[in-house]
Image (tube, helix red, strand yellow):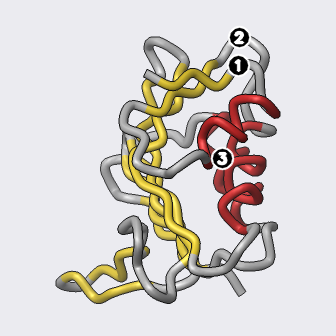
Amino acid sequence: MVQIKISKKVKKLHPVVENIANNLAQTGVIKFIRILPDFIQASNEAAVGGSVRLPITKPGHPTAVGVSLIIDLASKEVHFFEITSAVQGYGGTMVDAVLSALPQEWGAVVVMDWSNGFWERMQQKYIHLEIL
C-alpha cells in the first residue's frame, strides 16, 4: 500500500503531477509519496520530520530507492532534483515512471549530474531528457 500525502497548500492537483504520482506508485517499490505545490518526493523509505513522513531521496543512501522532482508548471518542465537507488535497476524504473507521465510538450531536466554515467544512459533512451 502506497501512502500519498498531498500538502494542504495544493489547491488542485495538476493532471501531470497526478500522473507522475500514479506511475511512481505503480513501480512496485515506492511506498511513500509527498506532493507539494511544486515538488514531489517518492521513496520506499521515509523519515519522520515533525508530523510528516518525508520520503528519503538523498543520493547514495545505503537502502533507499527514491526520487525528488521540482515541477515547473509555467515552463512545463520536470527537474530531477535528487535520485537514489540502493537496488540496481530501480533508478531507471523511476525515470521511466516520471517521463512516461509527461505530455509531449513537457520536458525533463537534470541540473547536476554526479551519477557516473546513469543520466547519459537515460538520455540515450529518452530524447526529451536534457542534462545541463
Q: CA distance from mark 1 to mark 3?
A: 20 Å
When the figure is inspected, residue 90 is found, relative to residue 130, above or below; the finding is below
Question: Circle 2 is placed at which residue position?
Answer: 105
Q: Residue at x 79, y 68 (%)?
A: 27
When the figure is inspected, residue 38 is found, relative to residue 53, above or below; the finding is above
User: In the visual, does 41 lie left or right of 4?
Assistant: left
How far from the left and from the top, in percent, is residue 59? 40, 65
Could you tell me the amino acid type at mark 1?
His
User: In the visual, does 14 lie left or right of 57?
Assistant: right
**Of the residues under marks 2 and 1, which one precedes in the sequence?**
2
Would residue 22 be visible to someone looking at this image? no
| Quadrant in the picture for residue 2 | bottom right
Q: Residue at x 77, y 29 (%)?
A: 124
Question: Circle 1 is placed at which residue position?
Answer: 128
User: In the visual, does 48 lie left or right of 94?
Assistant: left
Question: Which mark, residue 89?
Answer: none
How far from the left and from the top, in percent, is residue 91? 66, 61
